[in-house]
Image (spheres, grey):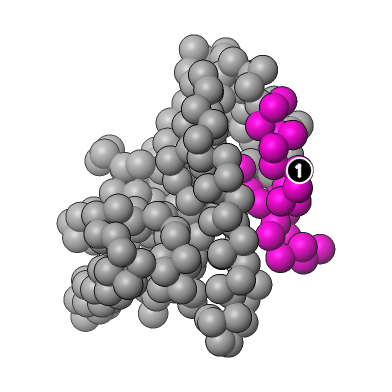
Amino acid sequence: MFWMQVYENIRIIREKIERASVRSGRSADDVTLVAVTKNQPVEAIMQLLEAGVIDLGENRSQELISKKGALEARINWHFIGHLQRNKVRYIIPFVYLIQSVDSMALAREISAGAKRINKVQDILLEVNVSGEATKHGFAPDEVVQALNELVLLGNVRVKGLMTMAPFVDDAELTRPHFAKLKMLYDSISSRQERNIEMQYLSMGMSNDFEVAIEEGSNMVRIGTAIFI
């Protein structure tokens, strides 16, 4: 019964993504659904794969490593949590996208780890748009300088920006935060350098992803709404 509910929840989420995409003048095909599998068993992941969801997000390195070892299927693994620099070397060999690069120190560690295995690691810069002290990330006015420094790193490729809006009951209250990051994204999106390819704007979670898509998100990270 639980698995049938997961399928139904994914269907509902996809419909909501499609409607929000239409409202923003885009196609649902332009929006990537990343299913957040934190604390979910391997069996749950298999159900997601059967439902056609192959982009999976984890926010703990040890849990990500464990699940990767238990699954042989093609999966695009996204790391979406705060990443400690001493854990980088364990996930670099297989992670598809590190969405939560919140400092230059971490970016340099990722580049060094990727260089050791002859890899160029795709990353997103996490931006703390709301300015909340409890959140990690670059301040919006630090992003351009970070990009200037990232150009000098040989083994990372910046693919876009990510943010987490404040958790509020009324999703409409998140709209200004998403709009602010979209403006920043647009202002730097023409910057196509050797290792800067602005492609993803990762905004929106279970409680606010429709608003995020309306404001320009093309990647949403959803866990709770799938597994309720």
Foreground of the two, 145 or 99: 145
Foreground of the two, 105 or 228: 105
Q: Name the residue: 67% across, 17% down.
A: 152
Q: Position of residue 8 (x, y in %)?
A: 22, 77
Foreground of the two, 142 or 10: 142
Q: Is residue 95 above or below residue 21?
A: above
Q: Position of residue 7 (x, y in %)?
A: 22, 71
Q: In the picture provided, is 85 more to the left or to the right than 198? A: right
Q: Is residue 59 visible?
A: no
Q: Is residue 77 visible?
A: yes
Q: Name the residue: 51% across, 14% down.
A: 117
Q: Quadrant of the C terminus?
A: bottom left
Q: Is residue 9 above or below residue 34?
A: below
Q: In the picture provided, is 104 more to the left or to the right than 197? A: right
When asked about the image quadrant of residue 217, the answer is bottom left
195 is within the stretch colored magenta = no
Q: Quadrant of the N terminus?
A: bottom left
Foreground of the two, 57 or 155: 155
Q: Position of residue 40 (x, y in %)?
A: 42, 63
**From this viewpoint, which residue is outermost toward the bottom?**
169
When asked about the image quadrant of residue 77, the answer is top left
Looking at the rendered structure, the kind of residue marked 1 is Glu
Residue position marked by numbered label 1 in the rendering: 142
Q: Position of residue 15 (x, y in %)?
A: 24, 73
Q: Name the residue: 56% across, 19% down.
A: 155
Residues shaded magenta: 125-149
How many residues crowd around disc 1 within 10 Å: few (fewer than 14), some, or many (20 or more)? few
146 is within the stretch colored magenta = yes
**From this viewpoint, which residue is outermost toward the right?**
133
Q: Name the residue: 53% across, 22% down.
A: 193
In this figure, what is the number of numbered marks?
1
Dot 1 lies on which element? helix
